Image (tube, helix red, strand yellow):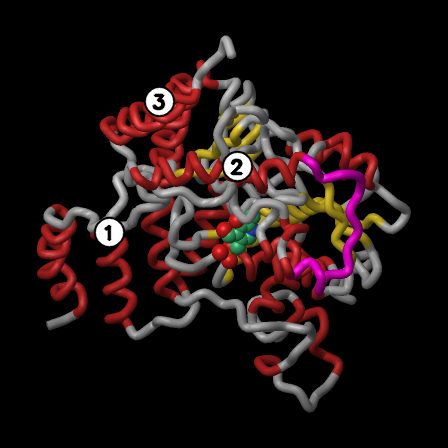
C-alpha cells in the first residue's frame, strides 16, 4: 500500500480515537492541556512514513507561515524557545555583526524572566542588568529601564510576561532613542500585540517558544524572527553547527580556501539547535488554531477578572488594557498586603478544589541559586519582583477551560475569599 492510501485508511480511525478519548487529568483546572488533534497526528504520520524526519520542507513551510503571520521577513525555527534566545544573542554577539554585543557590555532585562532569557547573555560574556517590574503588568517598568542605562548598555531584553504586551511600545521607544538593540523574548507572548504591533516584532529580533504547554505547540520548538538579512543568516548558521548551508555566507565567505568544500565550511561558533521535521509537521497544523485559542483565553480572563474585581482589596488580578491584545499564557493573582491570608493558604485551598497552581513563572530570578554564577548588576530596588515572588501564583488559562470550568473557578475562589473578606475590620 502506498503512503497516501495508508493515511486515508487510518484517518477516520485516528479522528475516532480523539473524539472518544477524554483527557485523563486529576485536576478540574489543570495548568495546561493537550491541544493537538488528529490533524497533527496525521501530518506527523505522513512525515514518519516519508522517511524525511530531519529538518526539511515542513520546517521550511512552517517558517514561511510564521514569518507571514508575524509580519517579519525571516522566521528561523529552532528546537526550543531557549535555543531561540541562544541563537538570537549569538547572532548579535557574532564577530560578523559589527558593533554587536561584546563581552562586558550590559543588557538590561527583567527581574522576572525565564532562566534561559538570561543564560545566553551570560554565556556571551555580557552582563545582565536586572530591573524591577511594573506591579500591574509584571513587565519591565519603562522609567526604571531609563534609569538603568549606563555607558556600557548595549541592549534591552524584555519579556512580555504571561503574554501581557503592556508597555512594549514604550520599551521600544527607549531602545530606539538610546540606540540600543531590542531583543524581545516573546516566548510567553505568542499572539499578543499592543497598539497594533505584534509582540516579538518591536526590535531587531524576537523569539518564540512552542513548548508543549504554550499557546501553540510543536512539542518542543522555537522561532527567531527578524527583518535583518545578516541576523537571519547568522541564526541559520548558529542553528546548524556554524556552517554556511542555508545562508548567504555561501557566497560571502566561501572563496577564501580551495581546500574546504562549501557544504563543510564553518564560519560561526555554532550549536545544533535544529528542530525535527516532526515539529515542523506540528507547526503547520497548529498555526491556524492560534487565534481561536487566544480569543478563548481572553474571554476566560475577562470573565474571571470581572468576577474578582470586588475582591481587589484582597488579591490583584490582571486586566487587559486599552490597545493591548493579551494572550494569557496563564491567569496570575497576587495576594495584597494585609489580605488576612497568604499565598500558600490560597494555593492549598485551590489545590483542594482540584485547581492546579504554580508560581508566576519562576518569580524573581535574583532569588534563585544560579544568580551566584552570573556576573550581573541590579539597578535600584526590585521590590515589586520580590513581592510577586512571595505573594503571586497562577492557574491555567487555556482552551481546555469550558463554560463550567470558568464558573467553577469563580465559585471556588469566592468560597475562599468571602470567608476572608471583612472590609469593616
Ligand atoms: C520567557 C521565556 N523565555 C524562554 C523560555 C524557554 O522556552 P523553551 O521552554 O521552549 O525552551 C520560556 C519557557 O517557557 C519562557 O517563559
**In the rendered image, is residue 363 in sight?**
yes
Measured Cα–Cα span from mark 3 to mark 1:
39 Å
Q: Nearer the viewer, mark 3 or mark 1?
A: 3
Mark number, residue 372 = none
The secondary structure type at the circle numbered 3 is helix
Q: Residue furthest front?
A: 425
The secondary structure type at the circle numbered 2 is strand
- Which residue is denoted by mark 1 in the rendering? 39
| Earlier residue among tags 2 and 3 | 2
Residue 421 placed where, x, y %?
Answer: 44, 17
| Earlier residue among tags 3 and 1 | 1
Q: Residue at x 56, y 24 (%)?
A: 338
Measured Cα–Cα span from mark 2 to mark 3:
18 Å
- Which residue is denoted by mark 2 in the rendering? 392
Q: How many marks?
A: 3
Q: Residue at x 61, y 80 (%)?
A: 262
The secondary structure type at the circle numbered 1 is helix
- Which residue is denoted by mark 3 in the rendering? 414
Amino acid at each position: 500500500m502506498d503512503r497516501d492510501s495508508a493515511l486515508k485508511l487510518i484517518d477516520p480511525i485516528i479522528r475516532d480515537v480523539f473524539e472518544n478519548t477524554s483527557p485523563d487529568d486529576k485536576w478540574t483546572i489543570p495548568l495546561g492541556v493537550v491541544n493537538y488533534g488528529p490533524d497533527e497526528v496525521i501530518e506527523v504520520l505522513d512525515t514518519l512514513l516519508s522517511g524525511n524526519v530531519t529538518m526539511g520542507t515542513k520546517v521550511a513551510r512552517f517558517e514561511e507561515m510564521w514569518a507571514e503571520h508575524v509580519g517579519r521577513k525571516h522566521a528561523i525555527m529552532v528546537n526550543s524557545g531557549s535555543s531561540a534566545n541562544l541563537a538570537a544573542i549569538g547572532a548579535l554577539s557574532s564577530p560578523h555583526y559589527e558593533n554587536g554585543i561584546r563581552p562586558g557590555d550590559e543588557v538590561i532585562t527583567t527581574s522576572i524572566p525565564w532562566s534561559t532569557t538570561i543564560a545566553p547573555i551570560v554565556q556571551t560574556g555580557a552582563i545582565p542588568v536586572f530591573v524591577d517590574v511594573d506591579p500591574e503588568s509584571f513587565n519591565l517598568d519603562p522609567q526604571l529601564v531609563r534609569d538603568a542605562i549606563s555607558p556600557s548598555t548595549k541592549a534591552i531584553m524584555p519579556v512580555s510576561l504571561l503574554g501581557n504586551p503592556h508597555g512594549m511600545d514604550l520599551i521600544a521607544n527607549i531602545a530606539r532613542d538610546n540606540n540600543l538593540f531590542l531583543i524581545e523574548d516573546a516566548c510567553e507572548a505568542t499572539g499578543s500585540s499592543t497598539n497594533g504591533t505584534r509582540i516579538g516584532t518591536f526590535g531587531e529580533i524576537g523569539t518564540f517558544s512552542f513548548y508543549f504547554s504554550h499557546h501553540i505547540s510543536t512539542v518542543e520548538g522555537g522561532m527567531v524572527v527578524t527583518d535583518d538579512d545578516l541576523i537571519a543568516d547568522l541564526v541559520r548558521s548558529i542553528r546548524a553547527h556554524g556552517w554556511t548551508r542555508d545562508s548567504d555566507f555561501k557566497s560571502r565567505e566561501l572563496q577564501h580556501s580551495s581546500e574546504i568544500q562549501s557544504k563543510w565550511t564553518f564560519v560561526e561558533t555554532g550549536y545544533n539547535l535544529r528542530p525535527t521535521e516532526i515539529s515542523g509537521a506540528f507547526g503547520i497544523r497548529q498555526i491556524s488554531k492560534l487565534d481561536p485559542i487566544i480569543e478563548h483565553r481572553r474571554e476566560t480572563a475577562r470573565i474571571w477578572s470581572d468576577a474578582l474585581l470586588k475582591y481587589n482589596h484582597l488579591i490583584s488580578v490582571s486586566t487587559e488594557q486599552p490597545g493591548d491584545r493579551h494572550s494569557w499564557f496563564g491567569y496570575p493573582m497576587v495576594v495584597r498586603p494585609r489580605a488576612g491570608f497568604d499565598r500558600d493558604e490560597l494555593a492549598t485551598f485551590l489545590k483542594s478544589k482540584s485547581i492546579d497552581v504554580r508560581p508566576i513563572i519562576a518569580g524573581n530570578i535574583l532569588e534563585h541559586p544560579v544568580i551566584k554564577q552570573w556576573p550581573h548588576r541590579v539597578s535600584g530596588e526590585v521590590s515589586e519582583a520580590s513581592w510577586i515572588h512571595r505573594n503571586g501564583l497562577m492557574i491555567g488559562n487555556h482552551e481546555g477551560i469550558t463554560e463550567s470550568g470558568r464558573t467553577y473557578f469563580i465559585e471556588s475562589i469566592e468560597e475562599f475569599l468571602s470567608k476572608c473578606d471583612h472590609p469593616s475590620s
